[in-house]
Amino acid sequence: MTEVKSKKGCLKRFLPYYRPYLPTLALDLFCAVLTTVCDVVLPMIVRKITNTATEAPENLTLRLILGIAGVYVVLRIIDTCANYFMVNIGHMMGAHIEADMRRDFFAHLQDMSFSFYSNTKVGQLMSRLSKDLFDVTEFSHHGPEEILIGAVKFVASFIILLSVNVPLTVFIYIMIPVLGFFVLKIRHELESAFHSERAQIGEINAQIEDSLLGIRVVQSFANEEIEKEKFQKGNEIFLGIKRMAYRALGKLHCVIRLFDGCMYIAVVALGGIFLMNGKITPGDYTAYLLYTTVLLNTVSRLAQFTETFMQGFTGIERFYEIMDMEPEITDSPDASPIENVVGDIRFEDVSFAYGDSNGDVLSKINLHVNPGDNVALVGPSGGGKTTLSNLIPRFYDVKDGRILLDGRDIRSVTLSSLRSNIGVVQQDVYLFSGSIYENILYGKPDATYDDVIEAAKLAGAHEFISALDDGYDTYVGERGVKLSGGQKQRISIARVFLKNPPVLILDEATSALDNESERMVQHSLERLSVGRTVFTIAHRLSTIKNAKIILVLNENGIVEQGSHDELMAKKGVYYNLQMMAES
């Protein structure tokens, strides 16, 4: 059993999140103890007044009653202030812990490799970031409080009741472990239900995200009813899980109510017998009934907290399930930054295979690209063009061989410095929700406004941006939905212009555009490519005729290599591709 699967180990790992808030926690627990004082003292006050009234009525004076009432009023004021602190500051402590965990979780997600996101639904991650960690807030705040309050009430009541009547006290407290046995049995059902509930919430979130992001496709195919049916199936599964959870909760509350009845019957019957035989006084009998209420209220609170505990603990377990996943691509212990990159790139016997594939996608690739060279990668889909380019910034690591940048194995270079020297322009442009200015600035966050304008001009984007009502402050919409494909692509090119990397990867950057947009974007790419080492992946062969080196890849690796004229003269694979493109 790994540490994350061990509840004790999981809790041990969670406890350090309390460390920055130990003073608040200590004060919160002190206030929790104060809130128990009234509950513990009230039965003794009633016992005192009752016994005085029955045994020595002449001693029950107004002064005594007012004095006792005054003490209780003071205790209630203390209880009120302590409770305010617990609800206000105590909850904020839980919120701070939740925020700290969410910060660590998000930071960990930023470090995860491409392969992780290829196999993980974003909706599941959103569920863990939101619902799971919200439940941790309640758990982290109420957990220590409820445990301490329950312990204080149980121990204080036990000591006080023992001083009144030992046999009746022992009988009452023997029943508590019996209740605990049944609660533990039901807890396993709750735990299973809450785990399933969290997973299904994640599935629903993922389905909603998938459907809404693809709403244009849904509506263009008039498939709204299909999406509704798919959602309803997931919704019904969730209802079934909820049914299972509430069935377990119903059992839990039935056991507690049955236990309540047994406790009261025991106190009323046995206490009545002891009272009849003179073993206890009327005041003692009344105190027993009140302490029984205190105990039962405590048991009920702990039982209700079982639900909070299980939900919170499930959230903690799911938190560590992701935190325990190590990124596949990390800095080596001796990695150091690379500086003054000129763009000399070598592939030496490079082989690569995806983790879930049966064979190598690339095998024994050898390639030398001089600084400033423009290398074009062509060939059928699945031939490894994008895979080869993804190995350069270490989006994936090679299986065998090595890749050198300016003579250094890229695995000896820090990821941050490696990727800061590589710019990528992809076919599927991703623009963040925000303004055009913010999206361009993403290429170099410390750039000035003038730098952003200049980058946009170089990318051929300044003219259309200036024509917009809000110019550079124009909101681009979710994933840039308010802009055309050509406009989005030119903004992404401006982003790379601003970054100004010595190595550039163009991954089918114009294949999804119309002819006019392609022409404008192609001009922008040509300007962007000047003075850089460029890898261009293209299906439209007309865009790469001027490349210095053209690599033709298929399932056998690099099958042809040379300039456009050289490859056409060979009349091989490249020649056939050109003939098909022109026909």
Image (cartoon, grey):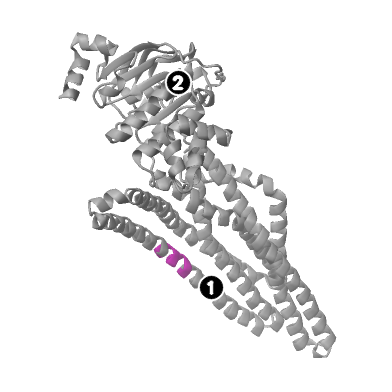
Viewer-nearest residue: 575 or 385:
575
Residue 325 sits above or below residue 38 on the image: above
Q: Which residues are magenta?
A: 247-254
Residue 241 sits above or below residue 276 on the image: above
Can you give x and y, in whole percent of width and height, for residue 423 in the image? 45, 26
| Corner quadrant of residue 159 | bottom right
Q: Residue at x 17, y 18 (%)?
A: 576
Q: Is residue 337 left or right of residue 394?
A: right
Q: Residue at x 49, y 15 (%)?
A: 342
Locate the C terminus and report the quarter of the image it occupies: top left
Describe the element under mark 1 as helix, strand or loop. helix
Extreme-bottom residue of the structure: 58
Residue 156 in sight in this render: no
Three-letter code, disc 2: Val
Residue 187's disc number? none
Q: Residue 253 colored magenta?
A: yes
Q: Residue 379 colored magenta?
A: no
State which tag comes first along the sequence, 2 or 1. 1
Q: Residue at x 76, y 76 (%)?
A: 73
Residue 503's disc number? 2
Residue 260's disc number? 1
